[in-house]
Amino acid sequence: MFDDRYTLAYRLYPYEKHADQDKPAPVRHPVVVMGGGPIGVATAIDLARQNIPCVVLDDHEGVGMGSRAICFAKRCLEIADRYGAGKPMVEKGVTWNLGKVFHRDDKVFEFNLLPEEGHEFPAFINLQQPYFESFMIERLYELQSQGAPVEIRGKNRVDSVDVKDDHVTLEITTPDGPYTMEADWLIGTDGANSPLREMMGLEFTGKVFEDSFLIADIKMINDSFPTERWFWFEPTHGSGASTLLHRQPDDVWRVDFQIGWDVDRKEELKEENIRKRLDAFLGEGVEYEMVWSSIYTFQCKRMKEFRHGRVVFAGDAAHQVSPFGARGANSGMQDVDNLGWKLAMVIGGKAPESLLDSYNHERIHGADENILNSTRSTDFITPKSEASHILRNAVLDLAEHHEFARPLVNSGRLSVPCVYDGSPLNTANALSGGPEITRPGAPCPDAPLGDEFLLPRLGDRFILLTIDADGPDSFEEDGVEVTRLALSADDDKTGALAARYLGEAKSAVYLIRPDQHVAARRDSFSDTQFRKALRRATGKV
Amino acid sequence: MAELTLTPNIDGGDDFYAELIGAHEGLSREESEAYNARLLLVLANHIGDRDVLKAAIDAAKRKD
């Protein structure tokens, strides 16, 4: 009745009978999160930090096996850091900068993704997903031990939901039998195959790519590769139409082979057959241990709407992208970042329910951008037609000799956070000469402040950031408080703060949202204008 | 004499690439080849400068 669908890497939340299960009437919880993956746990942490009680229900008892998502980008790490889990990730993770692109047997070119200076976090790290999830779950338990109202219930499988106007009723199965629970709000973070989406009969549409990739995680025994990302188009070893190699922690390398659409999964996943591919690719005499393997097909799909009344979807349950460009877990974390403060404000009576419609608006915008980027990478890596195959190879041929063609080579574009251009929460730009990268809707870029950095100083509240400008230490509008962070361009001798936040302007005042996106900016403080901007940023205009 | 630009010169290269393969959608192999030839002539006319065109013809030749 309760078989695991996958093997666990770490059993972190074993089933325990909860008092709720014996209550005569269903217990009502403010927020229930369905799915204990990275996005569900992040949601719980975000809400717990705002003192909003939250229960996570998961049909397993811990973190699944397999490296799966391995590339975590800067914005994702910055969010995790705000939750208190970012630094251990960076410590454990592998940072790489050098990438090499090969076509057939020739190296086409190499690139160095030297990170921009003046950011606390690297542009990205490689880290196996079970580590990422474990750090997050550890953090959740740490918050719980400090009294935060958060819990995660293992082997609590939601079998049906009844969505009402003001709550959701959930029928749950456990090893001790069924029980009923009620939730004011239900957050669906139950992954790409979301049972919740299914139960609600909601569509998930988009594009399926007719190809598949075989992943093999290997631990090298008598040899090693450098900490670089290598991508082969049409390698002559013939083990795949393209092959990707990059490094993870623990001396494990991820190898991806593009193996075509009509494959016999069971046959391909036999260790002897995987080894045949690996041996052809690695050459004679290289010894390695197999750590994990899997076959994935990929698709770019999303739900039409992420919010359905009292049910809100986030992460892969809401949108799925092909893995090129690392936009799955990274965009899911940005969903949570966007949803957490809005949901807490609505629950706390500080903002109207309609604020959550801006989650729908902004994150659909984000999902579409991610789908566009990952579709383009997929089209380049696995060309759909002969014409696009010829064009792709022409780019690779030219790139070997001519610099101009190199930016056109697309083996995955690095995940960068989306700018919420056109969001109903934005107030039009009123800082003339202000940099594009910090326009209203943009995520705040980090900047050094002596021994510290800017983003941790912004935290997760509404902030009035003044740079060489006056302003009140705090102000309150309709129950929402704004705290000032007063800085001067001189606080950062490297000039990054001025370059990123002033541009041509002499002074600037920013209203920054709790998810560290810019809501409004002007050259000086105006009580009327910033109160209006705050109302707009909280869905009251 | 103008020089042939062989450093990156296209803003939004990914957008351009997507438009280019989009133009081939639904075309047969032969139609695609004909399309490429027409596109080439349109671009060549825009460049106009014979020295640049000559340099481009050479640059596109396989080096190996």
Image (cartoon, coloured by chain):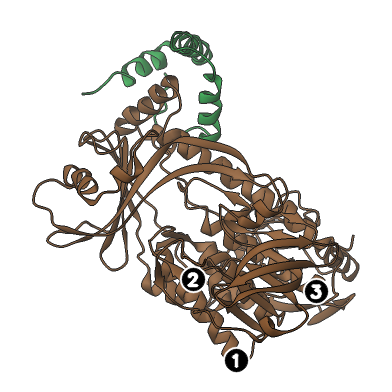
Q: Earlier in the sequence, mark 3 or mark 1?
A: 1
**Amino acid carrying mark 3 in the image:** Ile
Residue indicated by mark 3: A347
Left or right: residue A82 versus residue B2 is right
Percent from the top left, x then y, of residue A185? 75, 68
Asked if one can make out residue A313 in the rendered structure from this viewpoint, the answer is: yes
Q: Is residue A168 above or below residue B56?
A: below
Asked if one can make out residue A433 in the rendered structure from this viewpoint, the answer is: no
Distance (Cα) linking label 3 and label 1: 22 Å
Q: Earlier in the sequence, mark 2 or mark 3?
A: 2
Residue at image point 76% right, 52% down:
A423
Q: Is the residue at mark 2 from the same chain as the one at mark 3?
A: yes
Camera-near label (1 vs 2) is 1
Which colour is chain A painted? brown
Residue at image point 42% right, 18% down:
B1
Q: Earlier in the sequence, mark 1 or mark 2?
A: 2
- Which chain does the numbered disc 3 sit on? A
Distance (Cα) linking label 1 and label 2: 27 Å
Camera-near label (2 vs 3) is 3
Q: Are marks 1 and 2 in contact (CB under 8 Å)?
A: no
As drawn, the chain in green is: B
Residue furthest left in the image: A285
Residue sitting nearer the eye, A395 or A263? A263
Left or right: residue A472 versus residue A16 is right
Percent from the top left, x then y, of residue A179? 68, 74
Residue indicated by mark 2: A120
Determine the image quadrant of residue A92: bottom left
Q: Which quadrant is the C terminus of chain A positioned in?
A: bottom right
Residue indicated by mark 1: A146
